[in-house]
Image (tube, rainbow, N blue to C red):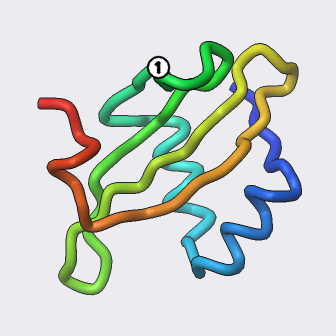
Amino acid sequence: MNFVLSRHAEEQLLRRSLNRKIVESVLLNPEQILEDDNDADIIIYQSIVKEEGKLFLYRVFVNTNLFPNVIVTLYRTTKIEKYYES
């Protein structure tokens, strides 16, 4: 599967000091794939990752109607129970 980062996603990757290898891992082997309630073109790839002894949920928003697929934004959060679907 091919993915490219939008300018915004690239900025967020740097601004939030996210690990690019973890983002790639989430895209290639997500624990969950969700539809975005606000935009039918967006699919959310997410996984729980342990970094520095703390659990984070990485969320990567991808426009799958474009080729290659475009990562429109991404972030990590500690609010796992808010976003992770059981």
The amino acid on which the numbered mark 1 sits, given as a three-letter code, is: Glu
To which residue does mark 1 refer? 35
* Spot occupied by residue 14 in the image (x, y as percentages of width and height): 71, 77
From the top left corner, tell me how far across and down residue 37 is, in percent. 47, 22
In the shown orientation, is residue 59 left or right of residue 12? left
Vertical position of residue 14 compared to residue 83: above or below: below
Q: Quadrant of the C terminus?
A: top left
In percent of width and height, residue 23 lies at 55, 55
> In this view of the protein, which residue sits in the foreground, 52 or 37?
37
Secondary structure type for disc 1: strand
Q: Looking at the image, which residue is at 26% across and 69% down?
A: 50
Q: Position of residue 63 (x, y in %)?
A: 71, 27
User: For residue 72, which quarter of the picture?
Assistant: top right
Quarter-of-image position of residue 32: top left
Q: Left or right of 82: which side holds 23? A: right
Image quarter (top left, top right, bottom left or bottom right) of the N terminus: top right
Q: What residue do we see at 80% from left, 49% from top?
A: 5
Q: In percent of the image, x 69 and y 67: which residue is there?
A: 12
- Position of 52 with respect to 34 (left or right) is left
